[in-house]
Amino acid sequence: MTYVAGLGTRQNIEAAEEGVNAYLRTKIGDGVFYGATFRFDTAKNTAAQIADGRFFYKFECHPTSVMERITVDSYVDTKFISDALSLAA
């Protein structure tokens, strides 16, 4: 990844977020995810961890579900007979 071993500036943190989020938007458009976000985790990052070069990000997503069961509600409608045979109502 472009930002690994780069400087931990605010611009690089935001650029990493935007780069990953742009990629995730393409995957959402491709139907891979219902939604997804990648954000710098301000709650988990501490000054000591940043000084050690460890940056925590939060990735939240939900992949597109597989259609395992499809339920069809069927009904026999006699209006189709009238339409098909041009019968009077």
Image: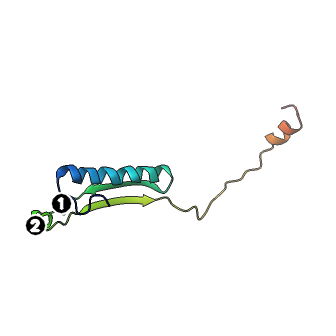
Which residue in the structure is indicated by mark 1? 43
- Asked if residue 44 lies left or right of residue 31, the reply is left
Q: Quadrant of the C terminus?
A: top right
Provide the secondary structure element on which disc 1 rests. loop
Of marks 1 and 2, which one's residue comes earlier in the chain? 1
Whether the residues at callouts 1 and 2 have beta carbons within 8 Å, the answer is no
Q: Residue at x 40, y 53 (%)?
A: 24
Mark 1 or mark 2, which is nearer to you?
2
Quarter location, residue 71? bottom right
* SS class, disc 2: helix
At a point 77% along the width and 49% down the height, the residue shown is: 76
Judged left or right of residue 10, residue 58 is: right
Residue depicted at x 45% and y 54%? 27
Quadrant (top left/top right/bottom left/bottom right) for the N terminus: bottom left
Q: Which residue is more in the foreground, 5 or 71?
A: 5
84 up-or-down from 39: above or below: above
Q: Please state the horizontal and vertical placement of residue 88, each as a whole percent of the image.
A: 87, 31
**Residue picked out by circle 2:** 48
Instruction: Indicate which disc residue 4 carries.
Output: none
